Image (cartoon, rainbow, N blue to C red):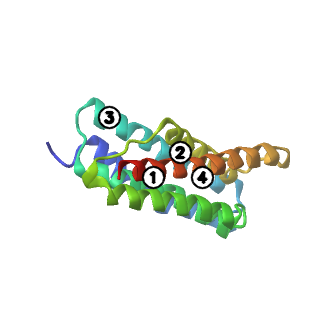
Amino acid sequence: MTVINLPNFLTILRFLALPFCAYALFKNGGDQTSWRILAWVGFFLVGLTDFFDGRLARSRHQVTSLGTLLDPIADKAAIGTALIGLSMLHRMPWWVTAVILVREIGVTVLRFAVLKDGVIPASKGGKLKTMLQGFGVGFFILPLPHWLFIPRDLFMAAAVILTITTGFDYFSKVLKKK
């Protein structure tokens, strides 16, 4: 099986798109509506490729070691780029960024540490967490009217809660296997 296939190409494309996403997010101090919308489109497309690369790899039987390694790193790089950028622009509280990134990096490191014992697949909660994080961050990137700030913040709160609970769930599954 070749290492460079469509699913792996999409994963690599996600990495390559992140500098553009960050540039658009920071352009003109992050205050210009058109650039914020472009940043949102960029991060949305990055998230969309994440959705498709895994499905394509499984459906075409093109799962590779490279894809297994790069996919979760690309996910964390994308959410990390957006969260850190938003926090630097004072649009996202730093504590939210810290909680999410500590969980994501911790689970990723743990996942690689136990890889020899077999992969623990993402749970439904983990997949929902990823979706909530993506949409939550997207709502902070978009130039929303003030009256949508409370629903936006509640959405992100749900993402943070699910991030924490799925992190504990993942660690407990690993400990039970030991």
Residue indicated by mark 3: 56
Which residue sits furthest top?
59
C-alpha span from label 2 to label 4: 12 Å
Q: On the rendered structure, is 128 left or right of 88?
A: left
Question: Which residue: 40% across, 37% down?
Answer: 52
Residue 173 x, y percent position in the rendering: 43, 47
C-alpha span from label 4 to label 3: 29 Å
Q: Label 1 is placed on what type of residue? A: Asp
- Cβ–Cβ below 8 Å for labels 1 and 4? no
Question: What is the secondary structure assignment of the residue under circle 3?
Answer: helix
C-alpha span from label 3 to label 1: 16 Å
The total of numbered circles placed on residues is 4
Q: Nearer the viewer, residue 110 or 70?
A: 110
Q: Nearer the viewer, mark 4 or mark 3?
A: 4
Residue 6 circle label: none
Q: Is residue 107 visible?
A: yes
Residue 75 circle label: 1
Mark 2 or mark 4: whose residue is earlier in sequence: 2
Q: Nearer the viewer, residue 42 or 82?
A: 82
Q: Label 3 is placed on what type of residue? A: Leu
Residue indicated by mark 2: 130
Residue 16 x, y percent position in the rendering: 39, 58
Q: On the rendered structure, is 116 left or right of 168?
A: left
Can you say whether 79 is above or below 147 in the image?
Answer: below
Q: Nearer the viewer, mark 1 or mark 4?
A: 4
Question: Which residue: 68% across, 65% down?
Answer: 95
Q: On the rendered structure, is 36 left or right of 109?
A: right
Q: On the rendered structure, is 162 left or right of 115?
A: right
Mark 2 or mark 3: whose residue is earlier in sequence: 3
Question: What is the secondary structure assignment of the residue under circle 1?
Answer: helix
How crowded pointer 4 is (Cα within 10 Å; few <14, some 14-19, many 20+) is rated as some
